[in-house]
Amino acid sequence: MVSDPQELEFHGVLVIDKPAKVTSHDVVARVRKILHQRQVGHFGTLDPFATGVLPVSVGKATRFAQFYLKSRKAYQGTIEFGYSTDTYDATGKPTSEVAPVDLEVPELERHLHGFTGRLLQTPPPYSAKRVGGVRAYELARQQKPVKLTPVEVEIYALELLSFEGKQLRFAVECSGGTYVRSLAHDLGQKVGCGAHLAGLRRTAVAEFTENRAITLERLQEAAQEGRVDSCLIRLEALLPDCPELVVRGREETSVRHGHAFELAHSLRPGRGEAPGHAPAASLLKILGSERRLIAVARHVSGAVYHPNLVLV
């Protein structure tokens, strides 16, 4: 017998393959409707015209957004040279005359290399950044001047996949907060013929990769067949690089009540080394006696941790 999704409550992350022409908010609303569950969010907005990985948090997983704000992201996309646009992508209006494109791969690779590492990047005028308490895109739509402060981002890798005619296909890995649209626009300014982002697909956010992604249609089918659990990444699998600590008895009760605790000497990082020689883990995943995640604790000082997220 297939379970009625209205009778169930789910906890975990769905890696949704977001289609083009819908917002991240639209996807969240659709998941709420499919699962009949209000507690749904996401780990990082994806522009409407872009496709690909959108981690959607469900139930208690929505409280993990704080740990993914600055997560590493990966994309593949296409930059078209010849003119720039006001949105820095193909949905915008041209802001320059069409210019001839006479570029060679070695030259482009040199420019791409110049965009790697830590750099200051100015967000696009059509972005969700706030200017005097107002979203930048709201001012831009009203044709009001938008002056955004450059922010530091990091481009870990930027690879030219192919170049044909006016279009460059690329792959990039970057820090959270990086605008790939700005990257395309800035490259166009650098080479002197203007450019905009013609297409974009996100392939990863932190540990969430496109090989785990499902479409909204597949999620709908899974819900109808009572297979939603098979689509979810469980809470215990989140933050995979975070050390785990199993607690039992009074220690488990204390953690569940949000009390700070000190690691036993045998569990401290760098056992056998002089104190202070090995950095403590900034986060610990705390598992209960049944090896289910009950809390995430932050390092306070020394061997002391405080459970700042308790999954009651």
Image (cartoon, rainbow, N blue to C red):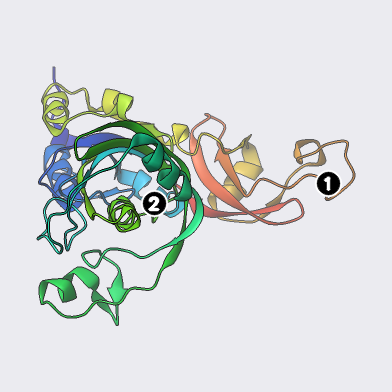
Q: Is mark 1 on a helix, strand or loop?
A: loop
Can see residue 202? no
Q: How far apart are marks 2 and 1 (CA)?
A: 31 Å
Q: Which numbered marker is on residue 89? A: none
Q: Which numbered marker is on residue 65? A: 2
The residue singled out by tag 1 in the image is 277
Q: What residue type is labelled 2?
A: Ala
Mark 2 nearby-residue class (10 Å; few <14, some 14–19, many ≥20): some
Q: Which of 269 and 297 is in front in this view?
A: 269
Q: What element carries label 2?
A: helix
Q: What residue type is labelled 1?
A: His
Can see residue 100? yes
Q: Where is residue 140 in the image (x, y as percent from the top left)?
A: 16, 72
Q: Quadrant of the N terminus?
A: top left
Which residue: 14% across, 38% down? 19
Q: Nearer the viewer, residue 86 or 43?
A: 86
Examine the rendered structure and indicate whether residue 121 appears above or below residue 249.
Answer: below
Would residue 46 be found to the left or right of residue 142 on screen?
right
Q: Where is residue 29 in the image (x, y as percent from the top left)?
A: 14, 49
Examine the rendered structure and indicate whether residue 125 appears above or below residue 172.
Answer: below
Mark 1 nearby-residue class (10 Å; few <14, some 14–19, many ≥20): few
Examine the rendered structure and indicate whether residue 160 appears above or below residue 123.
Answer: above
Q: Where is residue 91 in the image (x, y as percent from the top left)?
A: 11, 53
Would residue 25 be found to the left or right of residue 56 on screen?
left
Q: Are marks 2 and 1 in contact (CB under 8 Å)?
A: no
Q: Which image quadrant is residue 88 in?
A: bottom left
Q: Nearer the viewer, residue 56 or 160?
A: 160
Would residue 42 be found to the left or right of residue 18 on screen?
right
Q: Where is residue 170 in the image (x, y as percent from the top left)?
A: 32, 36
